Image: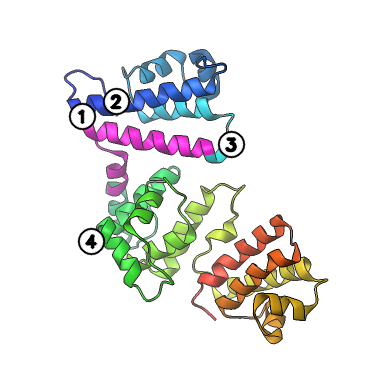
Amino acid sequence: MAHTMNFASPAAVKARDELTTFLRIERVTAGRAGKALAFSALAAHSGIAPSALCQVENGVMITWRLVEGHLKGCTHFRAKARAKAVLAKGRRLFDRYEEASGGVTAAKLVEKRANAYWNRSHTLKIAPGMNGQIEGLHCLSALYKRAGLSLRGLAEATDEDERLDKGYSHSTLSKALSSSVPLTPDHLRAILAVCSVPEEQWHTWSNFFAKHDDPDTHDETYWILAPTPERLATLRTDFGEALDEALGDAVSNRVAEQAGLDLPTVTKLFAGDPVPSEAINGILKALTAFKVPRSTIKKLTSLAQPLQLSTLP
């Protein structure tokens, strides 16, 4: 939905100015020696005409496609995490502008689509057609609202749910759902649990966020929330093999002592047998004492995530 600024309300003008100021700052940042990147150069990186990019920055014609293209052009050379943060902030400012100017926010559109899908399918799977992580977060917000919860009520429910190891504050969930901080598997698991999403449907949500996560930070294993018994057995074997590769030359007694575990438990870990999550935590903490490479610790931590969360033996 495009907006022009004829007869705009003070709130819409303020929201527009915040958005366009943000766009100008990002274009200056993308330039050199304090000089803003030319619109022609920005167009080459965004695939959008220079005149359209100029219009969105001046608040003449504002659509999400133009805002997104402008910011992607500005951040194409930056680290993925930084570029992602800039795009997320741009989305928040655009949504605020749309709401203030009387438009239907992207979040409301996602909520409408999601509820229509849930009513039609009689499931609580993530609605199909979500385009990117921001829409996925909007869909997750629609889920807790469908459950009759406010954001504060959602936080209180995670604190009261006995199935969860810990609860989350209103502030933490607010930041995660607005992409101010990364959404983690723990956040997602807590929200799905208190919103009564059946465990066999969790993978639709976790697969979506795995797909849109930064591959340089996490792999898909990090997002396995409710693995089947067969998948758990494979993960345990993979964890044991990776552990053996990392600590194979270390004396088992030393490993057990450093991890605060008995030798039979350590043997089970190496063999890929079921152990309590506390044992996995102990062995992960012990890795630093044996000068295990960071890449190996990252791999083991990723494999451990679904093992620690699983309620299955």
Q: Are marks 4 and 1 in contact (CB under 8 Å)?
A: no
Q: Quadrant of residue 290?
A: bottom right
Q: Position of residue 81 (x, y in %)?
A: 54, 41
Q: Name the residue carrying label 2.
A: 16
Q: Are marks 2 and 4 in contact (CB under 8 Å)?
A: no
Q: Name the residue carrying label 4.
A: 148
Q: Nearer the viewer, residue 84 or 129?
A: 84
What is the spatial separation of the Cα atoms under label 3 and label 1, in whole angstroms? 34 Å
Amino acid type, mark 2? Arg
Residue 20 visible in the displayed image:
yes
Q: Nearer the viewer, residue 64 or 18?
A: 18
Q: Name the residue carrying label 1.
A: 11
**Mark 4 or mark 1, earlier in chain:** 1
Amino acid type, mark 4? Gly
Q: Are marks 2 and 1 in contact (CB under 8 Å)?
A: no
Amino acid type, mark 3? Ala
The residue drawn where x is 43% and y is 64% is: 189
